[in-house]
Image (tube, helix red, strand yellow):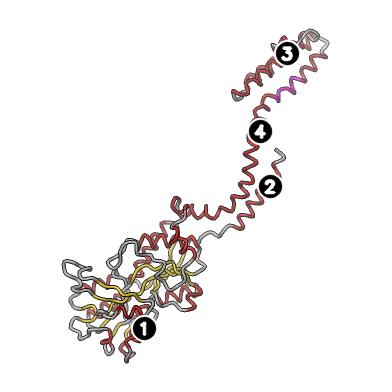
Amino acid sequence: MKVYWPLIAVTVLGVSVAFMFMDPAPPKEIRFAAGSPGGAYHAYAERYQRLLQEQGVKVDLLDTAGSVENLRLLDDGEADVALVQGGLASDRDREQLRSLGGLFPEPFWVFVRSDSDVRGFEDLRAKRFAIGGQGSGTRTLALQLQGEFGGTWPASSQLTPSGTAAADALLAGEVDAAAFAASLEAPYVEKLLRSPDVRLVPFPRAEALARRQDALSAVTLLRGVVDIGKDIPSTDVPLVAPVAQLAVRKDLHPAIEALLIDSAVAIHGDGSLLSAAGTWPNPDATDLPLSGQARRYYKNGPTFLRRYFSFGWANFLDRAWVLAIPLLTLLFPLVRAAPPIYRWRVRRKIYVWYKDIRELEGRGRSSPTKEERERILKELEDLQEEIGTVEVPLSYTDDLYRLRSHVEFVKQLVLNPKGAHPSAVLGT
């Protein structure tokens, strides 16, 4: 056994060193830039929060003005993950951030009062137009489209209400038009689509705008898709739509990235009124570089460990593979040594008695008196009783009975030092 102590010591050292080289554990808490409360981004962020917290990762939601602020928080290290509108990323963003894929199209909705004379986006130049606050993706996209249509757009008419506040202002007649870059599931969008007091402005040249703006795609809100019974909308409505994407800092732990993609599949994979099931998340619908973890996930799916283990166990096993080499270094010789060690332990139960037998034999041979020989015989009988309590596997019974016969031989030797013969006792 002494031979293995150096091996065990080296293995323990190897395991200790391996622990030093293990990948760091994923964080237990992340910060999610969630957009404005009541908005579609915030509602989605809350769903991500619930799914991640079920896996033991706490998610702190940060209320923001929208995509532009979300990107800034990611760049400055004040957030770890965010939903951001496509087409807003700068060179700095592409350097420091990574995408986990596009999640859903978020049409650019423009609503006006039902009695308005506005027929197209270009008719909004002189109107009180709520395009969202500073830092919102809606405002950025509205200004980009204003540039596409040209002409003069008075700054005084570019108002800052956004989300629910903008929808309420439009319904109250406080603004002439309101814009939103949001999913169809946004509560204020559905509210306006169903209201008889406002109507949706179409983009007849949506295909042309999508060709001119890489971040935009042309989508069609089909007749009746919101409500078949009430025929909402009453006609097909062409729209332009950027794609919302899941952006993360490039140093975010890969295990958290995989967990976020798992959540994205669960949240967005079933499709919507604007897209078929299985369309999202989409690794190609992004203007940020796709992370390496996301690229592997979309190519191969979840890892083997993630398919069969919880997030915590899968992550530990994935990190602990570096321990396999030192552990195998120990395991292989121990497996080889196990049978000999087992045999040695069993036989030791038998052979340990021979020291006493040899001692009693020596004393018996040199005992001059009958009384002393009787004491030795008594000790041999006691020894024989103790040996009778020894238990060994059936395959080692032969050795045990041989031990008993040797005790009997020594007894005969003590009784008749000159006449005892091993063959008479052992039956050979």
> Of helix, strand and loop, which one carries label 2?
helix
Q: Mark 2: which amino acid?
A: Ala
Residue 366 image point, x, y percent = 83, 14
Query: Residue 356 magenta-drawn?
Result: yes
Q: Earlier in the sequence, mark 3 or mark 2?
A: 2
Residue behind mark 1: 144
Q: CA distance from mark 3 to mark 2?
A: 47 Å
> Of helix, strand and loop, which one carries label 1?
helix
- Label 3 packing within 10 angstroms: few (<14), some (14-19), many (20+): many
Q: CA distance from mark 3 to mark 1?
A: 109 Å
Q: CA distance from mark 4 to mark 1?
A: 80 Å
Q: CA distance from mark 2 to mark 4?
A: 21 Å
Residue 59 image point, x, y percent = 43, 64
Q: Residue at left 41%, top 78%? A: 88
Q: Residue at left 47%, top 73%? A: 74
- Predominant secondary structure in magenta? helix
Q: Residue furthest left?
A: 229
Q: Earlier in the sequence, mark 3 or mark 1?
A: 1
- Marking on residue 9: 2
Q: Mark 4: which amino acid?
A: Pro
Q: CA distance from mark 2 to mark 1?
A: 67 Å
Q: Which picture quadrant has residue 384?
A: top right
Q: Earlier in the sequence, mark 4 or mark 3?
A: 4
Q: Mark 1: which amino acid?
A: Gln
- Marking on residue 58: none
Query: Residue 191 magenta-drawn?
Result: no
Q: CA distance from mark 4 to mark 3?
A: 30 Å
Residue behind mark 3: 409
Q: Earlier in the sequence, mark 2 or mark 1?
A: 2
Residues at badges 2 and 1 in contact (C-beta under 8 Å)? Answer: no
Residue 369 image point, x, y percent = 81, 9
